[in-house]
Amino acid sequence: MKVLIIGDSHRNVGFFEQAFDAAAANGCARIVQLGDFGFGWRWLDLGDSLAICRFSAEVALLVERFGIPVDFVDGNHENFDRLLSMPLRDDGTHEVAPGVRHLPRGYRYELDGCSFLALGGAVSLDKIARTALVSWWPDEAITDADVAACGTGKVDVLLCHDMPLQSEIHGRIRMSGYGIPADVDAYLSRMKLSDVVDATEPDWIFHGHIHHRYQQDPGATSRATIVGLAHDRQALAKSSVVFDTRTRMIVPVDERRDAVSLAASDAPGRKVPS
């Protein structure tokens, strides 16, 4: 099975439209999004005290049109009060809209015998300029309980939002500019993610958050291949990758089809109206 893995979407419907086009063109059966999905910032009132996240509803329409389901881990820009209050399905996920699943922290599953572990979360470095429970939520950071939920058994693929300390890019990122406490909070959260990496020994780590595309092959700091993906305002070639669960490798995309996707990805995306 081919899976299209994409970076931060930030409530950008246009970005998801491009992703679905690319997934269909390259024979992908699922889309996996690596956090800062944009859940719960605006709501549609369905009456009788029912409501649905507007962005999730837009993505669900694309799921219906293309027949490709979407899974996402949480980032640091989700409405966690709403997200974590949703009931868990029998499979252990939150279905936020038809065909759109949130993978809770510590959630494990398999595709074609390839094992996946989800560990969303990260720290909003700019939270000093945000409003608690309105534009940032304390549940964003990775906790000791999240680490415990991940367990110690080996996995093939770790899906996360933040970047583990095993990434060599970590040491080259400038300080946030929001002060030492923000940088310390981010480091401590990443330490917990790194503890999970050590405990589960993934062969592949995919993450978003830093809005930078890179690939780090196994080496001195990690036995895993670490892939960071860009975000919704960059070309799809930088913000997505195709992963084959049977071979457990990144696979080349169809060059002719990718050229179409890249042309589309250069156009400005559209976000759900505020």
Image (cartoon, grey):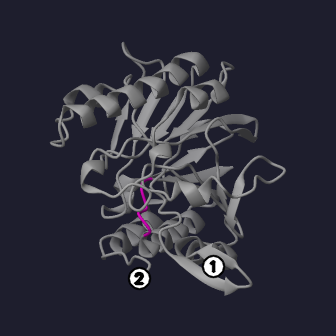
- Magenta stretch: includes residue 8: yes
Give the SS element for disc 2. loop
Residue type (three-letter) at the residue carrying disc 2: Pro
Tally the numbered discs. 2
Q: Residue furthest bottom?
A: 47
Q: Which residue is mark 1?
A: 61
Residue drawn at the location 66% of the way across and 79% of the way down? 65
Residue drawn at the location 34% of the way across and 72% of the way down? 263
Q: Is residue 132 above or below residue 24?
A: above
**Where does the image place residue 44, in percent across and percent down from the top left?**
58, 81
Q: Is residue 13 above or below residue 93?
A: below
Q: Which residues are magenta?
A: 7-11
Q: Report how far apart the C-alphas of labels 1 and 2 lie in the structure.
A: 16 Å
- Please tell me in which quadrant of the rendered image residue 234 appears: bottom left
Give the SS element for disc 1. helix
* Of residues 89 and 31, the one drawn nearer to the viewer in this rendering: 89
Can residue 193 be spotted in the picture? yes
**Where does the image place residue 103, in percent across and percent down from the top left?**
64, 48
**Disc number at residue 101?**
none
Q: Which residue is mark 2?
A: 273
Residue drawn at the location 30% of the way across and 76% of the way down? 268
Residue type (three-letter) at the residue carrying disc 1: Leu
**Where does the image place residue 126, in percent across and percent down from the top left?**
26, 49
Residue drawn at the location 69% of the way across and 34% of the way down? 115
* Of residues 243 and 100, the one drawn nearer to the viewer in this rendering: 100
